[in-house]
Amino acid sequence: MEFDKILFLDGATGTVLQQKGLKPGGKPEHLNIENPEMIQSVAKAYADAGSQIVCSNTFGANGLKLKDSPYRLEEIVAAAIENARAGAGPDVKIALDIGPLGELMEPMGSLTFEKAYELFAKIIQAGVKAGADLILFETMSDLLEVKAGVLAAKENSGLPVFASMSFEANGRTFTGCTIESMGMTLTGLGVDALGMNCSVGPDLLAPLVERLAKVTSLPIIAKPNAGMPDPMDGHYDMNPDLFLEAMKACVKAGASIIGGCCGTNPDYIEKLTTTFADYIPVRREEPTVSMVCSPLVPVLVDHVTPIGERINPTGKKRMQKALLEDDLDYLVTLALQQQEAGAKILDVNVGYPGVDEEKMLEKVVRKLQSICDLPLQLDSSNPKAIEKALRIYNGKPSVNSINAKQETMDTLLPVIKKYGAAVVGLTINEDGIPTTAKKRVELAQLMLENAKVHGIPARDLWIDPLCLTVSAQQDQAAKTLSAIRTITDTMGLNTVLGISNISFGLPWRRLVTQTFLIQAMSEGLRLPIINPNQQDIMDAIYAYEVLSSLDSGSKAYIERFQNRTEPASAKAGQAKQPNAQPIQAVQPDAQTVQAAAQTLQAVVQTLQATAQSLQTTAQTAALPGSQTGIPAETLHFTQTADQNAARTAGQNSAYPSDVNSAEIPNGFSHSSPANALSSGPHSLGTCPCCSTPSALQRAVIKGLDHEASKTAKELLENPNLTPLMLVEQELIPALDQTGQQYENGKLFLPQLLSAANAAQAVFEVLKDQMAKTGEASLSKGTIVLATVQGDVHDIGKNIVKTVLENYGFTVLDLGKDVAPERIVDTVKEHNIQLVGLSALMTTTLPAMEKTVRLLKALDHPPKIMVGGAVVTQAYADQIGADFYGKDASASAAYAKEVFS
Amino acid sequence: MKIAIHEALRYAGVPNAENSELTFEMQETARQMEKQLTPKTCWKVFDLIQVDALGNPVHKSLSDDPNQTKNSVCGFQLAGTDIVLSGRTARTMLAGCEKVVVAAGTLGLPFEKQLAAYSASNMKKALLYDACGSAAVESVMDELEEEIIQKAKGWYLTDRFSCGYGDLPLSFQKDFSDLLEMPKKIGVYTNASNMMMPTKSVSALIGLSKTRQPARVRGCSSCSFAEKCELKKKGNYCGI
């Protein structure tokens, strides 16, 4: 296909068909068979107006939308192509038009990538058979759906592929996908042209075309609506002349394949074809900046771009255990922590003996992408694992890594090219890591040549000149730095470097690591692989960006540091903050805890004091039509507040009266870490002489997660204290107490969850500890939780999950919209004794009933507890559930009973 | 959108927390949400045709056909479609209306993504965010109603009502989705159990009449949720 002139598409089909009598909500695809003349006349009108490409009337022709159709998909596609051809004549190319499948993809919906691929493949096979000239995806909103479509097109046809998505004026699709993410992902996948259609008029489209032009050199499609519709009469507000005027800006911004969408007709197209017939579009240069993305977050490597290294089991017992136990929630936590700490890309390595890496990497990528928005770097030495993960990755990832061995390059580079990823090239070959900078640069050169052979642009090859431990090979640090400089300056490639290794075996490692990072950035390193949770490492990047003019106006630096105060511990010369939160102000050390505790107390006091004595209730949920779902837990509290008396700040009556009792300042010394270490009488649990909760309990009750995990760590330094003791004597009593207060209306649900969160932080500490010592699990039993089939709300179920985990139960969370069969299979496979089911809407109660029925028919039926906004005790009894959980605490109490 | 903090707190299980830390946190949540999300709305107007039980048009004026009584009006057909709104709720809410607005609004999928992230890291934040979203989408619909009032000059609007209110079946959700092309226009999908995704989405009907509209019968008696409503059990009222 030639792109040296403007190429003219057609205008709206649906709009014209509706004018010709198609009912709103009717199926235009059926007209291909029922009224071929009508379809042909539309194609003819567009061809007469000068369209060079006319779309077949197949926008909604897919297996999902046509599932109740009297006609087969193949029949409809064949008739549609034939009608377009007959109407438009032999000189016009016919595009097989493919719209969204009409269901949401996982994880928001239930349509899987594989199923989407299959559905697209069927349309494409039919289109090829019917003689389509090209394939046009349009009005897409989910990047992963487009990816499934493009792969299906490329693997089932040799036809040119055009892909167009629908963007709002803010440059995002409904799913949040950005213009840039679309541009880099689809360019990487090898489409022939890409762009945008529908949604807005050409006036709002021009700035979007301009943005797209910055990330791709491919021809850009612009097929906007005729302005905005008036909801009163359905008419669009741009006439052909206004449309043409606004389209000029789109063409100027770089669009070279143009047409119209909703509200346009042949008159609009004729304006375009007569005006732009001889226009020569500007050829755009290939962008040179490296880029990767998730759908929501495009990352351009025009700054120092830190890659988080934490998702890697090497040397990390807790992570190893998580992988072996399929505990992906832990990996999600690592991802979110690194995102919060400022990582821009996350390296993901799940290779460990006993783990099926091919399955696991793909699974982890799906899981992480369902929650975390950062682009991922797929890190594996297993090419099959990489390929599987590349296929389902949503966006453009990077791959870690290839090396200069010919065999590795020959295996991986074609895959990298096919999926359009960026790739890290290690300067190592059969002979190992060269000891000179020159030789490493040569290997980089070799990898670049090979990449080019496969059609991979230079910007997508990132060179890792490798960092060796300085305590073992001291002269090598300078060699690495020198290689970075040469690769950056003479080859113009970006470099990647795992920094943390450098300091291995030395005391005060972080200083060496930080210094080396600064040296490497000065030589041109743009993609350091680091632990972003180490505050001083991230600090160094912010400072470097200021000093090298990459942080314009020092904006990012000021934002990070303006509220930073010098840590008191540093002043005292004992900086010890292993996991300090990078953005926040410092946490108080032992000397300042007391003052801080008083402040906190005052805060809590204010909070409590203002809770009025009243009997109010939370709206339970969702009027069905409005669907603004409120979890079942948000029910009723009777607040008999006596807290007004507690107003006088600095006095002892701080927290709800039954927690309180002279806990601060006197109570504090009872349970200070120093005392805990000496295993004194007040170190654990509630003090027997004055029933003062311990420091850990107070931290949990007040929901201070950092404080709680810090205290737990300190307590565990005592060798006589086991994690189990900590759970039994500290956590459970604290949780019981908050549960009681919630029950009595003295705490609200958000506060209860705050405490739960702090308890979870403590559990994390315990799990770390137990992974290190290899102790058996603390689990009190395994419970399956699920929101029933058809139900898409899961906050209530998630609240129950949190509370159950707090009490030491292992929860297999099957998520929302879960088929009864899947619940039954899980119960059988894991020999489950307790199942919790949640439903929010009346329409999904039958699914709950069915699930209960199937579970009760098992040879060893589990106990079943049910809950959710629409569930009542009476209903629970009626469907044969064993327990109705009115809220999370009640569910936890029942679980304790079942496993006692 | 202007999120009603009190409403949001109530949804989060905090009945009244003025000046408290939770109010502050909810305000923060609301600020973040207003910055982060771009709600989407769409609406269309349809002429209403009064039909009898067999779906045949009933003449508006009784004198046109002496054999017809008012009782024979069984429902309202949306002109140009096969959709007939029947039942007590539709008859009450749309009595005297010549047109009906079918409207929908949503906070969008990015809300769900953020909620999933909070659910994985901090349930308290998840709860506040979810509750804030419920209040937010209500405000989106209120603003949409304002927009409709502005555009529908010369028309009086009935109260807003939705599928699931009274005896208006939830199954219309799918029809409204098709009528408005919700997946294409605002990115809202309706599943087999008639639930919308994104979860913070609302569809609604508003009748248009040439004469001033009285407040219709509302409250628990017209709500299909009444039987199971936790508020009602305690003798309270959600206010809708």
Image (cartoon, grey):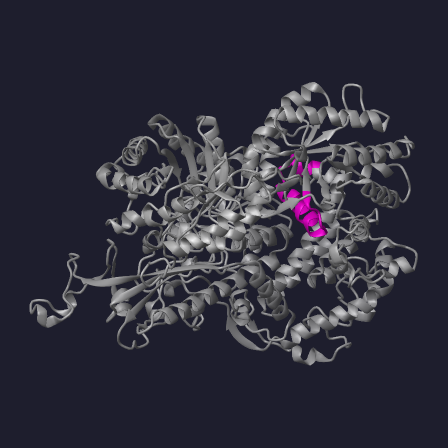
Quarter of the rendering containing residue B212: bottom left
Residue drawn at x 38%, y 55% is: A241
Residue drawn at x 49%, y 49% is: A250
- Left or right relative to A406: residue B223: left
* Front one among A199 and A415: A199
- Left or right relative to A589: residue A784: left
In the image, residue A333 lies in the stretch drawn in magenta: yes
The dominant secondary structure in magenta is helix
Image: A592 above or below A538: below
Quarter of the rendering containing residue B72: bottom left
Image: A676 above or below A381: below
Give the farthest residue toward the front. A278
**Total numbered badges shown on the rendered structure:** 0
Q: Is residue A295 visible?
A: no
* Front one among A870 and A108: A108
Residue B230 x, y percent position in the rendering: 44, 66
- Left or right relative to A43: residue A519: right
Residue B221 x, y percent position in the rendering: 33, 70
Residue drawn at x 31%, y 58% is: B169
Residue A683 x, y percent position in the rendering: 81, 58
* Front one among A505 and A414: A414
Residue B25 x, y percent position in the rendering: 63, 66
Give the farthest residue toward the left. B66
Highlighted range, magenta: A320-345
In the image, residue A22 lies in the stretch drawn in magenta: no
Q: Is residue A232 visible?
A: yes
